[in-house]
Amino acid sequence: MMDALCKTSDFIDHAMDRLYEENGRDRIFPKGVADSSTTSAVLFLIGRCRRQKNSCDTPCLILNKRSLMVKQHGDLCCPGGSISSRVDAFLSKFLCLPGTPLTRWPHWKTWHKHRRREARNLALLLATCLREGVEEMRLNPLGVTFLGPLPSQRLIMFQRVIYPMVCRIGRQKRFSPNWEVEKIVYIPFKNLLNPANYARYQVKIETSMEKEKNPDIRDFPCFIHHSGDSTEVLWGATFRITMVFLDIVFKFRPPDMESLPVVFRSLDKNYLTGNG
């Protein structure tokens, strides 16, 4: 499969097949997911990384880097957010019309016929993250190809459950980030499949106390992304979502965290408030 990474169509077809196999086993969305205040939906976006003229168009994971104006500033994240009940309920009905990314999904008819409740929740969650993609980065919602949902992830520092939706971006190459986004980051999947790019993220969480005898220090697995003069760290819920995708599609798992080099970071009290 590594040799096929330069063939985006093969990559997409393989990913869609593996996601469908994974999602055909159990119920994906719990009862009441559409009405929960802790529910979020995000886009796991796959696009092309264009490099030099002689290089191939390699598939990349496309992420947002949070700006100083929002919580968890500086982190890489998938575009998305909470359900806007009225707006997203209306948009979810639009997504059920012919020709939309959802109804173009090869498995939609099967879901709509045999998994009615799951299909309604899927439409609502996809509508939510597509709307957020438009707001955050001016994503063209009709220019994406829906590949399938990923298992949910629960945030550690916040009371929230994230439902990722895997989509491929077609022809759109330029985005216009809003105030929530510092920049768009492209990570080639071939780099994500390289064990040498992983590390142990040792995070010190600062409090309002000036002198703390026992600071809160935690270790997390992470991925280190180098691009030009900048270095980004992928960790937390977005890291876990990415690892689930790599496991399902490629049977890839990162090295054991205890064996990895350590990267340090200190989180100030503004990290959780967005007052950076």
Image (cartoon, grey):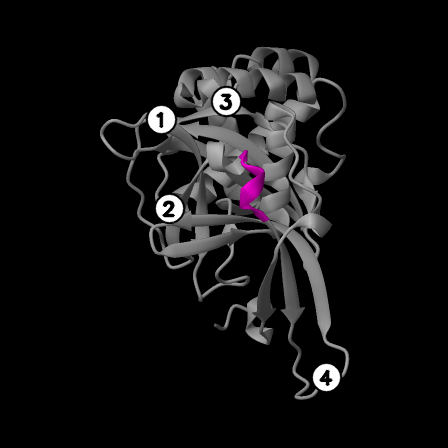
The kind of residue on which mark 3 rests is: Met
Instruction: Return the disc, 1 or 3, that comes first in the chain's sequence.
Output: 3
Q: Nearer the viewer, mark 1 or mark 2?
A: 1
- The reply to whether residue 97 is visible in this rendering is no
Identify the residue at the far bottom of this view. Answer: 210
Disc marking residue 212: 4
Given this view, does label 4 or label 3 mark the residue nearer the observer? Answer: 3
**Where 24 falls versus 233 (above or below)?**
above
Disc 3 or 2, which lies upstream in sequence? 3
Please state the extent of the stretch shown in magenta in the rendering: 193-198
Residue 122, horizontal then vertical, whole percent: 60, 29
Q: Position of residue 50 (x, y in %)?
A: 30, 33
Residue 265 shown left or right of residue 61 in the figure: right
Residue 144 on the magenta segment:
no
Q: Quadrant of residue 210?
A: bottom right
Question: Which is in the foreground here, disc 4 or disc 1?
Answer: 4
- For the residue marked with disc 4, what is the amino acid? Glu
Viewer-nearest residue: 67 or 53: 53
Mark 4 or mark 3, which has the lower sequence index? 3
**In-image side of 240 versus 128 (left or right):** right
- Decide which of 67, 256 is in the foreground and name it: 256
Which element carries disc 1, helix, strand or loop? Answer: loop
Task: Determine which residue is flagged by label 3.
Answer: 2
Residue labelled with disc 2: 137
Say what secondary structure mark 2 lies in.
helix
Would residue 195 be counted in the magenta stretch? yes
Quote the CA–CA distance across marks 1 and 3.
Answer: 22 Å
Mark 2 vs mark 4, foreground winner is 4
Q: Based on the displayed image, in which of its 4 quarters is residue 89 positioned?
A: top right
Mark 4 in CB contact with mark 3 (< 8 angstroms): no
Residue at image point 65% right, 34% down = 244
Callout 3: helix, strand or loop? helix
